[in-house]
Image (cartoon, rainbow, N blue to C red):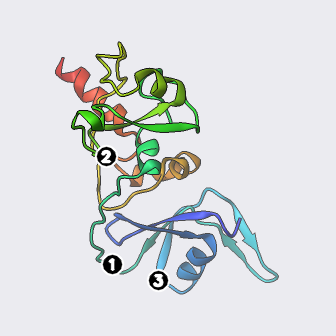
Amino acid sequence: MINTPVLVLNRGYEPVNVCLTRRAVVLVLGGKAEIVENSRGEIHSISRVYEIPSVIRLDKMVHRPRCQRKLNKGEIFSRDQYICQYCGKKTKELTLDHVIPRKNGGEHTWENVVSACSSCNRRKGGHTPEEAGMKLLRKPRIPWNNGFYVPFSLLNAHGEWRKYLPGQTDFYNMEESSDAASS
């Protein structure tokens, strides 16, 4: 329990970091942070009982530069929620697929790379989805970036964090709801 992640918020409730429970308790006991969410119970010592925080807020404002999300396999799989973008199969055994193949001038960018299962990747081969008779479930896009990123695995495990991470809960559901509203 002492090594579980805790979401750290800035004084203005913007997400800043994720730390371990041990560090969060030290910050709270030192008067540098307050507990915002306690959904994990308590830690008992010989003389005291301490709440186990899930979300803490720092007492002072911390200024951090916005980081750019790197384009790599893990980030693509996370953006696509480990779902093959051709057949819809959810699996951890995915490959990257260039929608417009590199041999046809396709670039290695957020808008051209998707997650694909091995069988769909083989079936598509070096063709575009239209040439291979396949359809993308969702058009690939650059993920939303508020300067702080929490992997979907942590977000799903700690649902109480969602209200502090606007726009990051489900990139594609937001897109689909806006597409449906405009139709």
Mark 1 nearby-residue class (10 Å; few <14, some 14–19, many ≥20): few
Q: Amino acid at mark 2?
A: Pro
**Precedes in sequence: disc 1 or disc 3:** 3
| Residue 99 at x, y percent in the picture | 31, 31
| Residue 139 at x, y percent in the picture | 29, 29
| Mark 3, secondary structure of its residue | loop
> How far, Cα to Cα, is label 1 from label 2?
24 Å
Report the residue at 25% width, 43% height from top.
107
The residue that mark 1 highlights is: 62
Report the residue at 42% width, 75% height from top.
58
| Mark 1, secondary structure of its residue | loop
Q: Which quadrant of the figure contains the C terminus?
A: top left
The residue that mark 2 highlights is: 143
Q: Amino acid at mark 1?
A: Val
Report the residue at 29% width, 45% height from top.
108
Q: Is residue 67 visible?
A: yes
Judged from this view, the residue extending furthest toward the front is: 103
In front of the other: 172 or 26: 172
**Precedes in sequence: disc 1 or disc 2:** 1
Q: Is residue 62 above or below residue 172?
A: below
Q: Is residue 81 visible?
A: no
The residue that mark 3 highlights is: 32
| Mark 2, secondary structure of its residue | loop
Between circles 1 and 3, the one closer to the viewer is: 1
> How far, Cα to Cα, is label 3 from label 2?
33 Å
| Residue 33 at x, y percent in the picture | 47, 77
Judged from this view, the residue extending furthest toward the top is: 133
Residue 151 image label = none
